[in-house]
Image (tube, coloured by chain):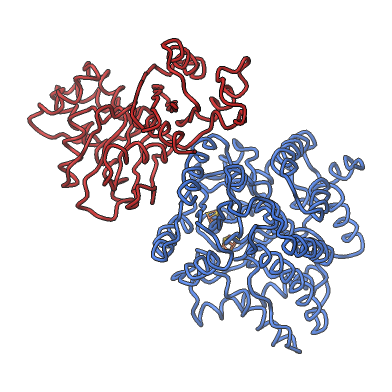
Amino acid sequence: MSDYTQMWKDLGLNLEAHDMLLNVLGNAYKDIYLSQKDRPEGMGYFDFVMSEVHGLRIKELLDEKAQGRKIIGSYCVFVPEEIALAANATLVGLCSGADFAVEEVEKYLPRNTCALIKSSFGFKLGKVCPYLESADMVVGENTCDGKKKAYESLGSLVDNLYVMDLPQMKSDGGKALLKNEYYRFKSAVEKLTGVAITAESLKNAIKTVNAKRAAIHRLSELRSAKPAPISGLDALLANQVFFYDNPARFTESVNKICDELEKRIQDKKGVMAEKTPRILLSGCPMAVPNWKLPWIIETSGAVIVGEESCVGERGTRNLVDESGDTIETMMDSIVDRYFKVDCAIFTPNQDRLNHVAQMAEKYRADGVIHYSLQFCQPYIMESIPVEKALEGKDIPTLRVETDYGMEDAGQLKTRVQAFIEQLG
Amino acid sequence: MNYAGIDIGSRTIEVVVVNSSGDIICSLQADTGFDPIAESLKLFDSIENSGIKYQRIMATGYGRTLFEVAYTNLDPHPLSAPKDLTLADKCSTVTEIKAHARGVAAYFPNAATILDIGGQDSKAIALNNNGKVKKFEMNDRCAAGTGKFLEIMARTLGFSIDDFGKEALLAQNDLTINSMCTVFAESEVTSLIAKGADRREIAKGLHISVMKRAAGMINRVRSDQSDSIVFTGGVAKNGCMVTLISEKLGCSVLVPDNPQMIGAFGAALISSEMG
Ligand code: SF4
Ligand code: SF4
């Protein structure tokens, strides 16, 4: 590994705190990921990406910047990557999957704020996220009330914060709002980069992001095989890396894993025995390095076969129609695709209930674990209708509410194990 | 052939040994103390000293995994089991949910709903017709609504834990306690005492608040409201709690002979059925 100290210093990171974070991340990765058995060889790429997550990838982004590209950070899958790419910008997800600088955070946010929002502040206040610090624009979005209000405070910490409004209903009015906001975003990005989006650049961007999603779709499909060819932890990692890797290289790497998995499936080889209970995970997004619950599940004798989450199928479902030829038709197609994302901030949100049940069936899950971050009102609220809908179809469901801390790991493990016993 | 089950809870440890027909041939209990593994091994020592042999151990309760690891690594290993058993086969684990379901099914084959309130946790379990777990709920991180809560409150009111339920049943009026949190409830109780409220009425109010929590959990899991409920765990020995739950839910509440042993008994039965 090269020495990136100077680069981190130049970005204004707090080196001591940053070392601590990398240490925790490295150890967690070793304990949770590298201890798994029978991983696909192709995961080696992701191991490399993770080991260089604050190193080589940041260097690449900084090199891109030196050549005039801009970096845009985002906290939500509603921020359209296509528009960023088409205007010569790179979009990266800002992960927010670990507690950091908790005491500092509580000067800005009430204690009963979800861990994800707290974490996004912690990374800023602790000066430990090189993605955030290299971003030329950070996009917040009006989704849940927690985020909406938090961005008001984040604005005082991040001078290049751009807030995107989002609809709450899947109505014509809602769609018009989204379209309007995507045009406003388009102008803002064009202004940032000084590059006007053309029909050609937009078409290419759509193709690039579609290819990335299609690769993930292919990976997801393969997980319906029995025995499951890849662990849920590894598949989750691919879904997490989706947010910050170079799109073309990511697509290629995922497809390579898929080739390998196809061979495994042919040979009837799995990561765990055929009779291993299969779990569909549904709920809040799991940002790096929030691997706690999947790790508990997969060390309790079950395998995760799908993620109904924004770091997962809710985020990657549906491609943008590629047939448009003008900026207007392509922008419409982009709006169409994103408008289908069934985040719990929408009301009513029957689509999500249908999708959870469909996914349980498609991936041959024996049960569904619904995961909500503590204090996440939209997903906690929706967990009850989700449970009812699934139980109506005789699909056993366990609802868990947790955060990034490890204090409840023992209790959580008991509940997860009891649920797995119930399925067995 | 005999099989042992051990339930390592936060307050007490129980060991039950059953024979191959599932009859209990020995059962023991000890306080968890600060070294649950040492206490557990002591219990097994005393069983072995009395000449009772067992083939396998099934551990349950929050200390199950710690015990499994400690037991498997014991040197010399106490079990002189047949050679074809690997060490891992000799001590395995099961969650307290499944253990309770199995133990209760042995006492009450038609049971559909179980309420278990132990030292520091409480759970409600719904069973299928075949006695398998259908759905369960557990209390979250704190001690609210558990045996520990009642124990602390009994002490605050100057009752022994054995008399706490009996005294509460003698209350003339109901009184409402608002706090479920042990710390806040304790100060609420202290201020009620200072105001001269009747100790028995306060005791009943505390029982009612625990009962409401338990009833809520039961209602979330059970589908048939008329079914009777099997009540296990240390708190099932509290007559006031049994009466209140039965009144609130409008159904009978059945308590097995030794409600604290159900987890260990169920674990022993599961071990005997592993084949
Ligand atoms: S869950 Fe909702 S708010 Fe969160 S990333 Fe997904 S769409 Fe955005
Ligand atoms: S997890 Fe829930 S509360 Fe937190 S940001 Fe997402 S939607 Fe909002």
Placement of the N terminus of chain A among the 4 image quadrants: top right
* Shade representing chain A: blue
| Residue A94 visible, this angle | no
Name the residue: 74% across, 48% down. A38
**Left or right placement of residue A112 versus residue B239 in this view:** right
Name the residue: 17% across, 31% down. B240
**Left or right placement of residue B255 versus residue A193 in this view:** left
Name the residue: 81% across, 45% down. A51
Q: Nearer the viewer, residue A108 or A253?
A: A253
Q: Nearer the viewer, residue A412 or B208?
A: A412
Residue B218 percent location from the top left of the image: 29, 46
User: Which residue is the extreme one toward the bottom?
Assistant: A325
**Left or right placement of residue A344 versus residue B142 in this view:** right
* Depicted A276 relative to depicted B63: above or below: below
Q: Nearer the viewer, residue B268 or B10?
A: B268
Residue A155 percent location from the top left of the image: 64, 54
Where residue A29 sits, quadrant-wise, is top right
Chain drawn in red: B
| Residue B146 visible, this angle | yes
